[in-house]
Image (tube, rainbow, N blue to C red):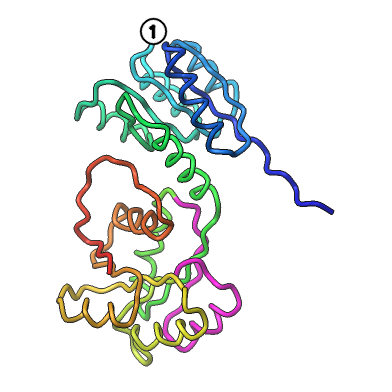
Amino acid sequence: MGTAKPLPIDVLVCDDSMTVAQFVVRAIEKFGIPARCTIVGDGDDCLRALTKQNFSLAFININLPGRSGTEAISIARKAGVETFFVVMSTEKTPERVQLARSLGVYEYLSKPFQTERVAEIMRTYLRISTQTSVLLVDDSSITRKVITKVLRQSLFDIAIEEADGGEVVLALYRARRHDIVFLDINMLGIDGPATLQRLKVLNANVRLILVTGDRSQALRNTLTVEKADHLLYKPIIAEDVGRLLYKLFEFEPPKFGEKEDNLVLL
């Protein structure tokens, strides 16, 4: 039996400029995954399309004839539409950015933009829609609960398995080969660095994030030698974890301009 072909994804492109709409469609086609693209040119048709068909992605111009793109998205969201939205505009103001974020829009593209920006969004969508397995290791159940909540607030589809210390980590990792391991540095018994070394023996390429409240340069130097992928500082917030996941999977986060205060690339 041959490998099943991936099902096409449905993409809505809303822009009153056919040139722009066709540019986005060609960029999607160039990316190389099967996609069925629908083009509409005004806000009313955009809203009708969103509420009548289950689109995976939608690229929507803010300045549409009739109702605006953000108004169409707002009404669609209230109706339960969970489409992965990207908005486009020649003018990017703080007010528009804030509104887009409040509507759960993934990205804000400033016109003109390059084909690669569309490709980045397509790569992100595919990765986010693929489940990521995470092994979360910490001897504090409260800390595990907090990190679990933060991970589930991220855009990524994450399946989490927990462990309370280094002794059980290796067995759990052998059984599933998790995509990512979050590992607390200061644990009772076998600490984070020692557990890291044992995991590296099992898989030299394991993706490891060490979690700590210690911001000292000495610790960073030690962990660089140990070859951890990233160091995540406490207190942990959803945006930091999201940016970290983007780095691990090597694609660009939304360009909303947040500072990376609690995330360190080693």
- Residue 225 x/y as whole percent: 29, 82
Q: From this viewpoint, which residue is outermost toward the top? A: 66
- Residue 1 x/y as whole percent: 84, 54
What's drawn in magenta, residue-wise? 156-180
At label 1, which amino acid type do we have? Pro
The verdict on residue 69 being magenta is no
- Quarter where residue 244 is shown: bottom left
- Quarter where residue 248 is shown: bottom left
Residue at image location 34% in from the left, 75% down from the top: 228
The verdict on residue 173 being magenta is yes
Residue at image location 24% in from the left, 21% down from the top: 91
Q: In the drawing, does residue 136 fall left or right of residue 109?
A: right
Compared with 255, 131 (above or below) is: below
Question: Disc 1 on helix, strand or loop?
Answer: loop
Quadrant the C terminus occupies = bottom left
Residue at image location 55% in from the left, 79% down from the top: 172
Residue at image location 43% in from the left, 70% down from the top: 207
- Residue 174 x/y as whole percent: 58, 80
Residue of label 1 = 65
Compared with 238, 109 (above or below) is: above
Compared with 196, 153 (above or below) is: above
**In terms of depth relative to the viewer, which is nearer, 76 or 85?**
85
- Residue 188 x/y as whole percent: 34, 89
